[in-house]
Image: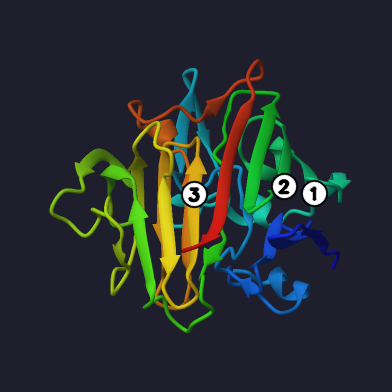
Amino acid sequence: MKEIVLTNHDLKVIILPYGGIIKELWYKGTNVVLGKKNAEEYLDNPWYMGACIGRYAGRLASEYTIDQVRYTHKKENAIQLHGGAQGWDKAVWKIYDLFHGTVPHVVLEYDCLEKDSGHPGDVSVLLKYSLRENTLQLEYKAKTTRPTPINMTNHSYFNLSGAPNLGDHELMIQADEVLELDHNLLPTGVINTVKKTDFDRNDLRSIGQSRYDDCFVLREKEAVNLRLKANSTKIQMDLITDQPGLVVFNPKELNGICFEVQKFSNAPNIPHFPNTIVRPCERYTQKTQFIFSNF
């Protein structure tokens, strides 16, 4: 399986065209993401490790309506998770552009056909990974032939120390609200305050025993949306995004934590959520930066 290596003075990232996967991300000698040793192992990737998620990140109820037309898509247990069986994490992306100069980057391309996805419209996607000094930048662009829901993210799990747990990690999230979820982890439409709960991470504090599979509502116009620090390696990661939501996921089975920047799950069925329906006259765009430093 092909691997693409981008390097600069501070960072090295290894990208797989299969799934648009971030296989490795090195900052000054430390691999800060979880990954599999061999690229072929990603053919079985139930945790979506490092993958690009689409056409719709998160959970989507089995039906939704666009312009008074009801659509029923492929689902399991009444929901579709991360694009389902034909999700973009399992697609083989084409290399559209590759540059190893001052700002190394790779642009991957994928065409998702309506007949394969279960959603209306053919969608063409460009996914760009670039290294800018101490920053890994992800940029997404998509267009469609019919109105359709699009919500993309990356599913890397971060561990800034390589330790078997995140006991030395501290986390800050600039969010005052979190989405209420039902028994299927599907948003109900209710938005709750984080005050006096374990969701309040506006101040940097230890991850400790906290477990999340939840969507935080990010405050707008913050210089940094999230900060993660590992005291043993003195590595700090700041996250900056133009997306309104941040799903934080740190399952007990893995020694990493995932930050899925996106719009909200099930938004096509909840009118007051940020819109995720993209029309042929529009373009889906997203930009997210992971910035590494020492403290």
Residue lying at 37% horizontally and 32% vertically, measured from the top left: 220
Q: Position of residue 215 (x, y in %)?
A: 36, 49
49 relative position to 69: left or right:
right
Residue lying at 17% horizontally and 56% vertically, measured from the top left: 197
Q: CA distance from mark 1 to mark 3?
A: 20 Å
Q: Which class describes the residues within 10 Å of circle 1: few (<14), some (14-19), or many (20+)?
A: some
Q: Position of residue 183 (x, y in %)?
A: 28, 57
Q: Which class describes the residues within 10 Å of circle 3: few (<14), some (14-19), or many (20+)?
A: many
Q: CA distance from mark 1 to mark 2?
A: 6 Å
Residue position for label 1: 104
Q: CA distance from mark 3 to mark 2?
A: 15 Å
124 relative position to 180: left or right:
right
| Local secondary structure at mark 3 | strand
Task: Look at label 3 and name its amino acid.
Answer: Leu
Q: Which class describes the residues within 10 Å of circle 2: few (<14), some (14-19), or many (20+)?
A: many
Residue position for label 2: 130
Residue position for label 3: 239
- Marks counted in the figure total 3
102 relative position to 229: left or right:
right
Q: Position of residue 150 (x, y in %)?
A: 57, 35
Which quarter of the figure has residue 278? top right
Q: Position of residue 244 (x, y in %)?
A: 42, 36
